[in-house]
Image (cartoon, grey):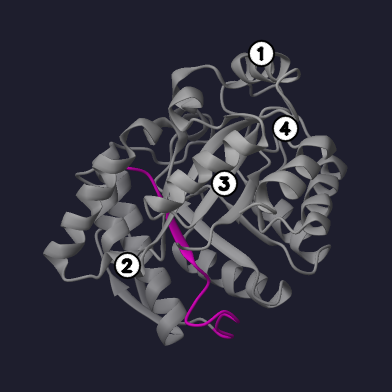
Amino acid sequence: MTNLDIGVYVPQMGFSYEDVLHRTLRCEELGIGSVWLYDHLYGPGVPQISSLEAWTLATALLSRTDRIRVGHLVLCNQFRHPVVLAKMATTLDHISEGRLQLGIGSGSIEDEHSRTGLPWGSFAERSERLAEALEILSQAFSDGVVDFAGKHYTVRDMPIVPGPVQQPRPPVIVGGVGEKHTLPLVARYADVWNVPTYALGQLEHKLSVLQSICDDIGRDPATIMLSVEAVMALAPDDEALPKVRQIAEKRFGTPGFGLHEGGLIGTPQAIVERLNQLRELGFQQVVLFTHDRASDETLELLASRVIAEL
């Protein structure tokens, strides 16, 4: 059975820097493998709530830790020119001594684009931009120079020096399950495929589609690490479970979070059983939203009675 890496999603909506840093340091102390942030200019749907900028925050966290990996699920390709992103990524890979996880997607919130005048476009157009960005990043990390002429980006003989610390490159994570646009990009470019919460009820079907696309282009699907994000409502015992479930329903009960489809509601033993089911499907990484936004108590319970059992 494959190893299973457990990460914790800490969306920075409403958190101070000290809040996020505390959770990240606690995860590192407990042996949790990774911490993940979102990349939005404000908290989705709540622009009045404080929200720290994603890349600056990741840089600060990586500079204050020694072992834990930090990434985004996922960076919005629309926000940064891919050459600039390549320079940012290689620099942060050096700062962190190889602990950066580079998640990237086509963008998901139109309103933050319209407020700032950034281009939006159809999903097909955004996917075209993402495809070109992934090609540019691939050249930057493998060749140390970018020479590319596309529909959306043109780059001429641009050096990317120094290259990344991680070899052959920082893991490139592509998130999403769209069969027409996203999964072909996963098959062609991704080191890691991340399944978002809204697709938890379609795991086996989407796996089959990705495998078929890989077969069509001649890529071994086993070379793509499978990752899934899910909400976990973890209770120490049966007595505490109703309250934990209630909190999870209040915070994550809307369909897009896949609370019930994910099946991660229960005591530690139930969570271990469900995580083992995901592992049997071939998933090697699970990134968890916790019902209480990564409290000390839940992180300690996750480490001592779930990860330890895995």
Depth check, front residue: 55 or 10 = 10
Point out the tag, 4 or 1, that comes first from the N-terminus: 1
Compared to residue 284, the image places residue 144 above or below, namely below
The spot of residue 256 in percent (x, y) is 45, 25
- Between disc 4 and disc 2, the foreground one is 2
Residue 169 magenta-highlighted: yes
Residue behind mark 1: 246
Residue shown at the point (31%, 62%) measured from the top left:
132
Q: Which residues are magenta?
A: 161-177
Depth check, front residue: 239 or 133 = 239
Residue behind mark 2: 222
Compared to residue 198, the image places residue 30 above or below, namely below
Q: CA distance from mark 3 to mark 4?
A: 13 Å
The answer to whether 268 appears left or right of 5 in the picture is right
Q: Residues within 10 Å of mark 3 (few under 14, many from 20)?
A: many
Name the kind of residue labelled 2 in the image.
Ala
Callouts 3 and 1 close, C-beta under 8 Å: no
The answer to whether 77 appears left or right of 297 in the picture is left
Would you identify the image quadrant in which residue 308 lies?
bottom right
Would you identify the image quadrant in which residue 45 lies?
top right
Callouts 4 and 2 close, C-beta under 8 Å: no
Residue behind mark 4: 293
Residue behind mark 3: 287
Q: Main secondary structure of the magenta part?
A: loop
Point out the tag, 4 or 2, that comes first from the N-terminus: 2
Name the kind of residue labelled 1 in the image.
Gln
